[in-house]
Image (spheres, helix red, strand yellow):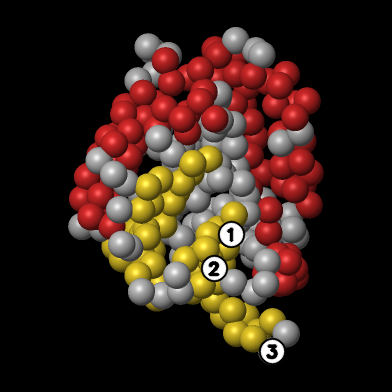
Amino acid sequence: MSILFISDLHLSAQTPAITRRFFAFLEGEARAAGELYILGDLFEAWLGDDAIDDPGEPLAANVLAALRAFTEAGGRLGILPGNRDFLLGDDFARRAGAALLADPTLLNTASGPLLLAHGDALCTADGDYQQFRRQVRDPVWRHAFLRRPLQERRALAAGLREQSETVKRDKSSELMDVTDTATIELLRAYGLPTLIHGHTHRPAMHTLSVDGQIVERWVLADWTAARGEYVRYDAGRLSRHALD
């Protein structure tokens, strides 16, 4: 059985081509592999698990149904929330038949451990973002936000996204990338496994020398209307694959 990893699809009502590609991937490559991990930002925004049953926004219910079809066919599914969909909760995971993963999560395989993360926590040079990240992941903030009516949450999320895009235009890509210092600290804490993450939209395989050992860091690609990509783990090796 192979294991597939994807991230940063940013599904929304405005990106139907990406949604169609994702559904085809679930029925094709993912089902053939048998095990799939989504490492953050499956959705462009997630306002709470009650959005699943919002009749005005069918995307959530359609995606949930596709994920459920994958797991009911025997697929194993893990979902790690990202910075756009950090409010994904237990109800969504239960209804999808998925495991909701902590960030980071150590995945033990027959060939050794893999460390899975979204990646945004490693972008420590961007102090403003890290402050915002701490705020929205605070349980008090989360509880207060989820108590608001869904339409109010939708308006607040739209405002936060617009503010985020405005701020990002004034930041360099290097500032918003992961830092070696944070990455090495994380790898040491987990025994120097191979790291797989998304978030930065800068797909690559990096090697780091840590305490005399070479460690790999695999960065997953974001999906667009023109392309999709996944990383496969098979017989102890990782490889990158583009979708048709």
Q: Is residue 142 above or below residue 4?
A: above
Indicate the quadrant containing the C terminus: top left, top right, bottom left or bottom right. bottom left
Residue at left offset 32%, top offset 46%: 75
Q: Do we see residue 21 in this rendering? A: no
Please name whichever residue, 119 or 125, is drawn nearer the observer in this view of the structure. 119
Q: Which mark is residue 57?
A: none
Where is mark 2, residue-wise? 113
Q: Amino acid at mark 1?
A: Leu
Marks 1 and 3, how far apart at CA: 22 Å
Q: Amino acid at mark 2?
A: Pro
Disc 2 to disc 1: CB gap under 8 Å: yes
Q: Do we see residue 189 in this rendering? A: yes
Query: Which circle, 1 or 3, is nearer the viewer?
Result: 1
Where is mark 1, residue-wise? 106
Circle 3: element type: loop
Circle 1: element type: strand
Q: Say which label, 1 or 3, has the lower sequence index.
A: 1
Where is mark 3, residue-wise? 212
Q: Position of residue 147 (x, y in %)?
A: 66, 14
Q: Say which label, 3 or 2, has the lower sequence index.
A: 2
Residue at left offset 72%, top offset 42%: 133
Q: Position of residue 201 (x, y in %)?
A: 49, 57
Q: Position of residue 209 (x, y in %)?
A: 65, 84
